[in-house]
Image (cartoon, grey):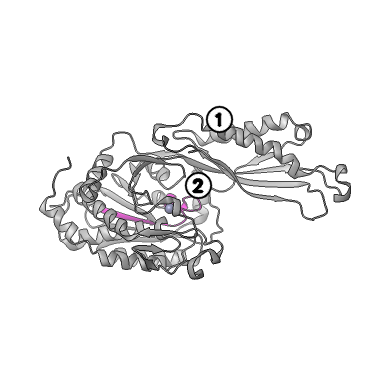
Amino acid sequence: MPRSQTSAERRVLDALDETELVDTLVELVRVPSVTGTDAESELQHVVARWFEEAGLEVDLWALDLDDLRADPDFPGTEAPRVEGHGVVGTASGDGEPGLVLQGHVDVVPVGDLTNWPGAQPFSARIDNGRLHGRGACDMKAGMAVNLAVARALHRSGVRTERRLALHSVVSEEDGGLGAFATLRRGHRGAAAVITEPTSGRLVTANAGALTFRIEVAGRAAHGSTRQEGVSALDAFWPVHLALRDLETRRNAVRHLLFADNPLPYGISVGTLHAGDWASSVPDLLVAEGRMGVRLGEDPQLARADLEDAVGVAAAADPWLRDHAPRVTWPGGQFASGRLPAGHPLMTEVTDAVEVVTGIRPAEAAAPYGSDLRLYTGVGGIPTLHYGPGDVRLAHAPRESVPLAEVVEVARALALVAARRLGAH
Ligand SMILES: [Zn+2]
């Protein structure tokens, strides 16, 4: 049974302004901060100002992209990027922050505009208690929650034994460069909550993800005499089947945290490019996709697994035997990550969520890579995800978030912060 609240904890919860929380979310969604765009940078500057207004000391800096790209642990990027900014706000005082609340300001592109109501993906329209728009749940709602918690602590007038820090990062959607840069700059904390959408659960681990490229050669010929050539598309087929088999094999044994997920480590080809003329036999096919990395698996072993599978398929094929497919690894390279088993953050968040919602949240793992693996890995910061919204709506044309859930999460995390930081 979770313990009842102290008067300091109640003062923090009372200081949480729910109207302002929703207004902030609306403002956030209205900035089309697609990863790598100018709007992403603009939003970081707005966030820096909000952090300052919430009583935090702000570190706002321009990322040194050349320096970061040269780092052996550089996580990779997919969107073209000419600049990026980091923003960290820390409550005044000394010592390592006792709690970090982290969120990313970038969102994925909107896709086909006609799939959005009124062709307006950044309207932040509120309808039946849900706020709609690109980034609504992934993860501007989480960003708004983080701010609301900092504001509540600041305005409540409580004193805390340890400090709160907020991290606002760019480039989560294309590899985690913003989180990486924030950690490389030296920002740390005793524990972190990333407020990505988790549908009321606590996500304590995530699978990794690696972007691969496979180039398969064919032999060009005129389409009218196609048998004179070799279609790179046909040549790719056994490779694709090998990827399917590999996926089955890699998902045959699953971690308990993935008990309800039939395919936590998916392998999916996302783009295919072949040929340059309709009546020519294509002499090159380039397939790009992603493969999941198992919990605790070295990404290097995952890469070797895929390269071996392609190699075995090629060895069994008369054409590919002499024209070996080329596998490379451009773009995002996410290792898996996990909150250390038994870390007190798990109990603290579980108890606070139960106090606020009356429901003890389940623990789960996410099949996608996120900043969690950088915070637990590069940063050595025990980290979990808990945030408003359903990740199945993220990246989708009708992305939305229920406002009641946004408020609940903010209240639960305000309580976590008050307790973990020793509010009195
Ligand atoms: Zn996200």
Where in the figure is residue 65, as x and y percent of width and height?
A: 50, 56
Residue that numbered label 1 is attached to? 249
In terms of depth relative to the viewer, which is nearer, 361 or 366?
A: 361
Tell me the amino acid under the disc marked 2: Phe
Tell me the amino acid under the disc marked 1: Arg
Q: Residues within 10 Å of mark 1 (few under 14, many from 20)?
A: few
Magenta span contains residue 168: yes
In terms of depth relative to the viewer, which is nearer, 295 or 404?
A: 404
Region rendered in magenta: 164-181
Name the side, left or right, on which 240 lies relative to 386.
Answer: right
Q: CA distance from mark 1 to mark 2?
A: 29 Å
Where in the figure is residue 206, as x and y percent of width and height?
A: 42, 41
Residue that numbered label 2 is attached to? 74
* Quadrant, the N terminus: top left
Local secondary structure at mark 2? loop
Mark yes or no: residue 375 visible.
yes
> Mark 1 vs mark 2: which is more N-terminal?
2
Q: Is mark 1 within 8 Å of ligand 1?
A: no
Which is in the foreground here, disc 1 or disc 2?
Answer: 1
In terms of depth relative to the viewer, which is nearer, 28 or 409?
A: 409
**Extreme left residue here?**
7
Local secondary structure at mark 1? helix
